[in-house]
Image (tube, rainbow, N blue to C red):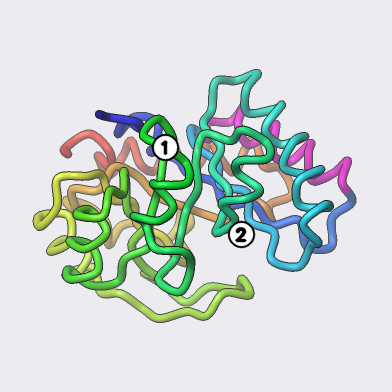
């Protein structure tokens, strides 16, 4: 069962609401989707469960208007509470197979992988796609362990599910991904910290077009 397509994963936004009012945050999200974001992961490490659910509901409403899938970072309970399209789990989060038991066969489950071994295991456990990286150091609050482009290529060639590159990527440093058979890229700061999130998304799409990213998988 294919729960997510290569086309849907092409420009994957991971949200960051740090230092943003809710109004500005939601506006950034909507404009980013208008600019070309095709998939969204809501990530809120600092909020209470109630706050997380309330914000996720509002983001999901925006995503539904544009037919953009929304997954919740880590929190299967929040994903279930807002009927999100799925969840994304890291290596220290709930295992993919347990998340699958809780969410069922129709929901999307993404997994983070930094090695070929992790990628194969995630696929075997039922992951629908992989986020691979970090390709570059990041400014987010997540612990960053760098993954080489060679490892990214090896992962893409070792699994049948789609893989996206993540980690410090922007329209000025993506050239290293030319020729790598990824479905797309995942970004945080390149969009969330941009003055104009719609224009930032458009630039990322244009750069991916130039490099042929998402067209050779």
What secondary structure prevails in the magenta region?
helix
Along the viewing direction, whichever of 17 and 49 lies nearer the viewer: 49
Q: Quadrant of residue 176?
A: bottom left
Q: Disc 1 and disc 2: Cα gap in Å?
A: 32 Å
Give the secondary structure at mark 2. Answer: helix
Q: Quadrant of residue 161?
A: top left
Residue name at image x 71 percent, y 36 percent: 59
Residue name at image x 47 percent, y 53 percent: 88
Q: Position of residue 5 (x, y in %)?
A: 32, 30
Q: Is residue 58 located in the magenta-colored stretch of the structure? A: no
Tell me the crowding category of disc 2: few under 14, some 14 to 19, or many 20 or more residues within 10 angstroms, Cα based: some
The answer to which of marks 1 and 2 sits earlier in the sequence is 1
Along the viewing direction, whichever of 119 and 34 lies nearer the viewer: 119
Question: Circle 1 is placed at which residue position?
Answer: 104
Tell me the crowding category of disc 1: few under 14, some 14 to 19, or many 20 or more residues within 10 angstroms, Cα based: few
Residue name at image x 54 percent, y 43 percent: 71
Number of dots carrying numbers = 2
Q: Nearer the viewer, mark 1 or mark 2?
A: 1
Q: Which mark is residue 189?
A: 2
Residue name at image x 31 percent, y 43 percent: 128
Magenta-drawn segment: 22-37
Label 1 with label 2: CB-CB less than 8 Å: no
Q: Position of residue 99 (x, y in %)?
A: 44, 52
Give the secondary structure at mark 1. Answer: loop
Q: Quadrant of the N terminus?
A: top left
Q: Position of residue 146 (x, y in %)?
A: 36, 78
Taking the image as shown, residue 168 lies to the left or right of residue 64, namely left
């Amino acid at each position: 069962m294919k729960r997510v397509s290569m086309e849907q994963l092409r420009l994957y936004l991971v949200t960051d609401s740090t230092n943003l009012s809710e109004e500005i945050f939601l506006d950034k999200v909507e404009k980013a989707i208008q600019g070309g974001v095709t998939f969204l992961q809501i990530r809120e490490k600092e909020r209470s469960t109630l706050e997380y659910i309330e914000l996720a509901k509002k983001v999901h409403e925006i995503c539904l208007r544009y037919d953009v899938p929304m997954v919740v970072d880590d929190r299967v309970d929040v994903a279930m509470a807002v009927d999100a399209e799925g969840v994304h789990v890291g290596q220290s989060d709930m295992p993919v197979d347990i998340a699958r038991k809780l969410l069922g066969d129709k929901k999307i489950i993404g997994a983070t992988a930094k090695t070929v071994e992790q990628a194969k295991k995630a696929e075997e456990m039922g992951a629908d796609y992989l986020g691979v990286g970090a390709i570059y150091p990041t400014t987010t609050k997540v612990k960053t362990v760098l993954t080489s482009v060679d490892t990214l290529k090896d992962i893409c060639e070792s699994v049948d599910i789609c893989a996206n590159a993540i980690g410090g990527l922007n329209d000025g440093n993506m050239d290293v991904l030319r020729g790598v058979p990824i479905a797309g890229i995942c970004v945080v700061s390149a969009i969330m910290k941009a003055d104009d999130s719609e224009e930032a998304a458009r630039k990322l799409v244009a750069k991916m077009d130039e490099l042929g990213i998402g067209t050779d998988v």
